[in-house]
Amino acid sequence: MKKIIEFLKNSNHYKHLIGGFIVSWLTASPYAGIYAAVVAATCLELKDRLYGNKFDLIDWLFTVAGGAIAAIIWLII
């Protein structure tokens, strides 16, 4: 458990997870939520690329995963 928490703190992965969740939750629709999370993740990675950093697939996946979690919750509700 300690390694998982340390991994999430590394490079602010938890912020991508929370951000994807919030973006998806605010759409109030599971399908639009997934779409919005993918768009948000892509935009964040584009911003990183434009600032001279490299594309980080892990950050992208965490953002989309946060959106998927919110979409699953919307499907259950």
Image: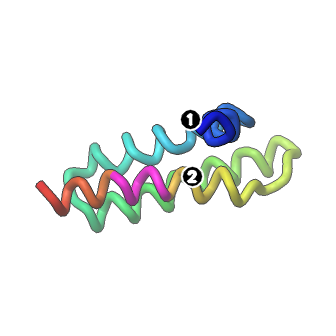
Helix, strand or loop at label 1? It is helix
Of the residues under marks 2 and 1, which one precedes in the sequence?
1
Q: Amino acid at mark 2?
A: Phe
Q: Which residue sits at x=71%, y=60%? A: 57
Q: Nearer the viewer, residue 42 or 15?
A: 15
Q: Check contact, mark 2 vs mark 1: CB within 8 A.
A: no
Q: Is residue 39 left or right of residue 59?
A: left
Q: Which amino acid type corresponds to the residue marked 1 in the rendered image?
A: Lys
Marks 2/1: CA–CA distance: 9 Å
Q: Name the residue that disc number 2 marks.
A: 62
Bounds of the magenta segment: 65-69
Residue reaching furthest front? 1
Which residue in the protein does label 1 denote?
15
Return the x and y of residue 77 as percentages of the image width and height.
11, 54
Tell me where residue 46 appears, x and y as whole percent: 70, 53
Q: Is residue 75 above or below residue 19?
A: below
